[in-house]
Amino acid sequence: MSLFDLNLQEIHTRLAGRDLSVTDLVRESYRRIGEVDSKVQAFLTLDEANALQTAGAYDKHLMEGSATERGLLFGLPAGIKDNIVTEGLTTTCASQFLRNYNPIYDATVMKKLRAGQAVPVGKLNMDEFAMGGSNENSSFFATRNPWNTEFVPGGSSGGSAASVAAGEVYFALGSDTGGSIRQPAAYCGVVGLKPTYGLVSRFGLVAFASSLDQIGPLTKNVEDAAYVLQTIAGHDPQDSTSANVDIPDYISALTGDVKGLRIAVPSEYLGAGVQPQVKEAVLAALRVLEGLGAVWEEVSLPHTEYAVATYYLLASSEASSNLARFDGVRYGVRATDPANLLDLYHRSRSEGFGPEVKRRIMLGTYALSSGYYDAYYLKAQKVRTLIQQDFDKVFESYDVVIGPTAPTPAFRIGEQVGDPLTMYLNDILTIPVSLAGIPAISVPCGLADGMPVGLQIIGKALDESTVLRVAHAYEQHTDYHKLRPQL
């Protein structure tokens, strides 16, 4: 039995009783990484010396019996997606452009994790600049799904999901732009939470699409997700899009009570393209909630069919703008012996960016160009508003929206890499939520062909408490979150 099979309360009880040390937890993390990461390939960079030093300081704190209150995440080893800036630790975004980038500051979420006394153990692989849904777009290597290493872990937070599923860390942070926390969580059989846009600071998150990006946790269970969210949520004056709202007690929301809960199930989320085993797993989950006193009805989100096109126009346009800063002048790699400034720009970007990043920059630049801005970008913004209004209308009568996280389970490595359109469609059920800026969680709800299936629970803006409550109630009456891959 791994120490990480203990729940958070059990770990903290054993730490307080000195039956366990933080150093034990950190060493368990690195032992497991040494044992399985050659198969999973979740980590890009490890920070063992600093992690053990931090663990030693926390153990001293325990031995001295200090009355100082311990953080919610005290002593827990954590993995960090490699687009979250970490002071003194390489932050590459899985891109050759940033392979030598060592930040001089911490992202706000890193400061909050350290305040919560978690122990970061390393940086996790991802699709380059978070652009992808399978982790095959990393410029270093492809992360593999712990359930079957011939399959993808999802993306772009594939390294984060795989590290938790493989038991390498207690929890991980990822980022979600169009489903990049929830989809890999579904593929790897873990819990993935995308908070409301603005609830968690983006300061120090390397930007992909600024109106969509949001940091969130990947964990083994819903309770852990609530603890991590409690730690990282909150207003940040360094982020102009940060929501200045009071943060509720997410942990106390886990009551298990869903009696009278009104659930909307969009017909578009269970239609063509959804694998029958996935559909059946979701319907079985709804029956569990029904047995707990909830009621559900089928509804329509009529603009869902336009979500993928809308997302890729908007996200690519914002990426085109955000990635203009990578020019070979300010930071990152630069071409050697350029003939002139334009040659420096051209060669640095050509050599530094991978094919998917180049594809999206070109698409976004085209959509923003003179003569096409109104036809593409502006129209996509209008459709985004219609998608938001679809959710607003449903939430007038219902508490949550439920459906699959992804239409199929994970697919084989290499199976879709040559077909970008098919790859993009894997996010068809997560993208509308991101466009609307509302919270959603993916929890394990079964297996299809031996691979995990995710149940997506979507809530009103800033109503993470209800999303977590429903997810926790479902989890308490099923055992899917207890299943572990056999590496």
Image (tube, rainbow, N blue to C red):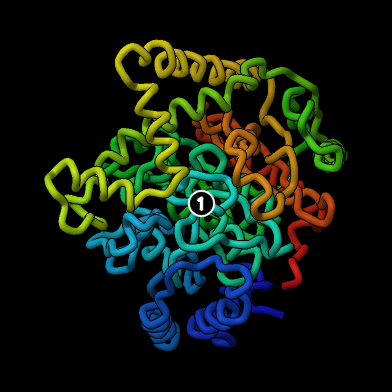
When the figure is inspected, residue 326 is found, relative to residue 93, above or below; the finding is above
Q: Is residue 239 left or right of residue 424?
A: left
Image quadrant assignment for residue 148: bottom right
Looking at the picture, how far across and down is residue 392, in whole percent?
58, 19
Extreme residue toward the left, this view: 340
Which residue is at 32% across, 55% downward?
Answer: 97
Front position in the image: 39 or 463: 39
In the structure shown, which secondary structural element does the residue marked by tag 1 occupy? loop
474 and 292: which one is in front?
A: 474
Residue drawn 51% across and 56% down? 228
Q: Amino acid at mark 1?
A: Asn
The location of residue 291, given as percent across then percent down, is 87, 40
Tell me residue 168's x, y (percent): 58, 72
- Which quadrant: the C terminus? bottom right
Name the residue rendered at 34%, 62% in the picture.
99
Identify the residue position indicated by label 1 in the image.
137
Camera-side residue of 168 and 476: 168
CA neighbours of label 1 inside 10 A, class few (<14), some (14 to 19), many (20+): many
Q: Is residue 473 visible?
A: no
Q: Pinpoint residue 402: horizontal percent, then vertical percent.
A: 71, 33
